[in-house]
Amino acid sequence: MNDPKIRNLQSTIRINAKNLVCHELIGLMFKIKESKDKKLNALEGRIADETMKTFVVESGGKEMRIPKDRCVWEFALPDGTKAAVEGSLLVCRPEDRTKKLGR
Protein backbone atom coordinates (compact mmCIF):
# COMPACT_ATOMS: atom_id res chain seq x y z
CA MET A 1 0.00 0.00 0.00
CA ASN A 2 1.78 3.10 -1.24
CA ASP A 3 -0.97 5.70 -0.94
CA PRO A 4 0.10 7.94 1.99
CA LYS A 5 -3.47 9.18 2.52
CA ILE A 6 -4.68 5.66 3.17
CA ARG A 7 -1.69 4.77 5.34
CA ASN A 8 -2.29 7.89 7.42
CA LEU A 9 -6.01 7.17 7.71
CA GLN A 10 -5.35 3.60 8.82
CA SER A 11 -2.99 4.77 11.52
CA THR A 12 -5.64 7.11 12.95
CA ILE A 13 -8.65 4.77 12.73
CA ARG A 14 -8.27 2.09 15.37
CA ILE A 15 -9.09 -1.42 14.34
CA ASN A 16 -12.18 -2.87 16.05
CA ALA A 17 -14.79 -5.54 15.41
CA LYS A 18 -16.96 -3.18 13.34
CA ASN A 19 -14.25 -2.01 10.93
CA LEU A 20 -12.05 -5.12 10.90
CA VAL A 21 -12.97 -6.06 7.32
CA CYS A 22 -11.58 -2.69 6.10
CA HIS A 23 -8.21 -2.93 7.86
CA GLU A 24 -4.83 -4.39 7.13
CA LEU A 25 -4.86 -7.92 8.58
CA ILE A 26 -1.22 -8.91 8.09
CA GLY A 27 0.41 -9.38 11.47
CA LEU A 28 -2.79 -10.16 13.37
CA MET A 29 -3.06 -13.34 15.42
CA PHE A 30 -5.92 -15.60 14.34
CA LYS A 31 -7.79 -18.76 15.20
CA ILE A 32 -9.98 -20.65 12.76
CA LYS A 33 -13.32 -21.09 14.51
CA GLU A 34 -14.93 -23.19 11.79
CA SER A 35 -13.76 -24.59 8.48
CA LYS A 36 -15.08 -26.66 5.61
CA ASP A 37 -11.74 -28.48 5.92
CA LYS A 38 -12.03 -30.15 9.35
CA LYS A 39 -8.25 -30.40 9.83
CA LEU A 40 -8.08 -26.58 9.87
CA ASN A 41 -10.56 -26.24 12.76
CA ALA A 42 -8.91 -24.58 15.79
CA LEU A 43 -5.73 -23.78 13.83
CA GLU A 44 -4.02 -20.76 15.39
CA GLY A 45 -1.19 -18.51 14.28
CA ARG A 46 -0.38 -15.21 12.62
CA ILE A 47 -1.42 -13.76 9.26
CA ALA A 48 1.84 -13.46 7.29
CA ASP A 49 0.49 -12.32 3.91
CA GLU A 50 -2.67 -12.27 1.86
CA THR A 51 -3.91 -12.39 -1.69
CA MET A 52 -7.39 -11.81 -3.03
CA LYS A 53 -8.63 -15.27 -2.06
CA THR A 54 -6.11 -16.63 0.46
CA PHE A 55 -4.20 -15.91 3.64
CA VAL A 56 -0.63 -17.07 4.09
CA VAL A 57 -0.47 -18.00 7.77
CA GLU A 58 2.34 -18.95 10.11
CA SER A 59 1.43 -21.68 12.56
CA GLY A 60 3.65 -24.11 14.42
CA GLY A 61 6.73 -22.86 12.60
CA LYS A 62 5.23 -23.55 9.18
CA GLU A 63 3.64 -21.36 6.52
CA MET A 64 0.37 -22.45 4.94
CA ARG A 65 -1.90 -20.93 2.32
CA ILE A 66 -5.55 -21.11 3.37
CA PRO A 67 -8.58 -20.02 1.32
CA LYS A 68 -10.35 -17.15 3.08
CA ASP A 69 -13.86 -18.24 2.14
CA ARG A 70 -13.60 -21.74 3.59
CA CYS A 71 -13.31 -20.56 7.20
CA VAL A 72 -14.74 -18.44 9.96
CA TRP A 73 -11.74 -16.47 11.22
CA GLU A 74 -11.32 -15.09 14.73
CA PHE A 75 -8.79 -12.28 14.99
CA ALA A 76 -7.10 -11.00 18.15
CA LEU A 77 -7.27 -7.21 17.95
CA PRO A 78 -4.63 -4.85 19.37
CA ASP A 79 -6.95 -3.77 22.21
CA GLY A 80 -7.18 -7.37 23.44
CA THR A 81 -10.65 -8.12 22.09
CA LYS A 82 -11.45 -10.85 19.58
CA ALA A 83 -13.65 -10.61 16.52
CA ALA A 84 -14.97 -13.40 14.32
CA VAL A 85 -15.51 -12.83 10.60
CA GLU A 86 -17.03 -15.04 7.93
CA GLY A 87 -14.18 -15.55 5.45
CA SER A 88 -16.33 -14.77 2.42
CA LEU A 89 -16.48 -11.14 3.64
CA LEU A 90 -12.69 -10.93 3.31
CA VAL A 91 -12.46 -12.17 -0.29
CA CYS A 92 -11.17 -9.18 -2.23
CA ARG A 93 -7.85 -7.62 -3.05
CA PRO A 94 -6.32 -6.39 0.22
CA GLU A 95 -5.60 -2.96 -1.24
CA ASP A 96 -9.24 -2.56 -2.28
CA ARG A 97 -10.49 -3.60 1.15
CA THR A 98 -8.32 -1.08 2.96
CA LYS A 99 -9.41 1.73 0.62
CA LYS A 100 -12.92 1.37 2.09
CA LEU A 101 -11.67 3.18 5.21
CA GLY A 102 -11.51 6.42 3.28
CA ARG A 103 -15.11 6.23 2.06
Image (cartoon, rainbow, N blue to C red):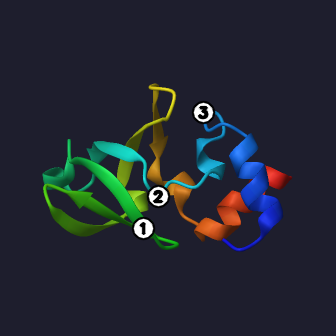
- Is 97 situated above or below 42? below
Amino acid found under the numbered disc labelled 2:
Ile
Question: Quadrant of the rendered structure where residue 2 is?
Answer: bottom right
Residue 41: percent from the left, percent from the top? 20, 45
Distance from disc 1 to disc 3, alpha carbons, whole Å, reads 20 Å
Q: Residue at x 20, y 53 (%)?
A: 40
Q: What amino acid is labelled 1 in the image?
A: Asp
Check disc 3 and report its element: helix, strand or loop: loop
Which residue is the site of mark 3? 16
Q: Residues within 10 Å of mark 2 (few under 14, many from 20)?
A: some
Q: Earlier in the sequence, mark 1 or mark 3?
A: 3
Contact between marks 2 and 1 (CB within 8 A): the answer is yes
Q: Position of residue 51 (x, y in %)?
A: 48, 73
Tell me the residue that label 1 is attached to. Answer: 49
In this view, the residue in front, 74 or 10, is 10
Neighbor class of circle 1 (other Cα within 10 Å; few <14, some 14-19, many 20+) is some
Disc with the residue nearer the chain's start (2 vs 1): 2
Instruction: Name the residue type under label 3.
Output: Asn
Q: Which mark is residue 26?
A: 2
Say whether residue 68 is left or right of residue 96: left
Position of residue 92 measured from the top left corner of the image (x, y, whole percent): 59, 67
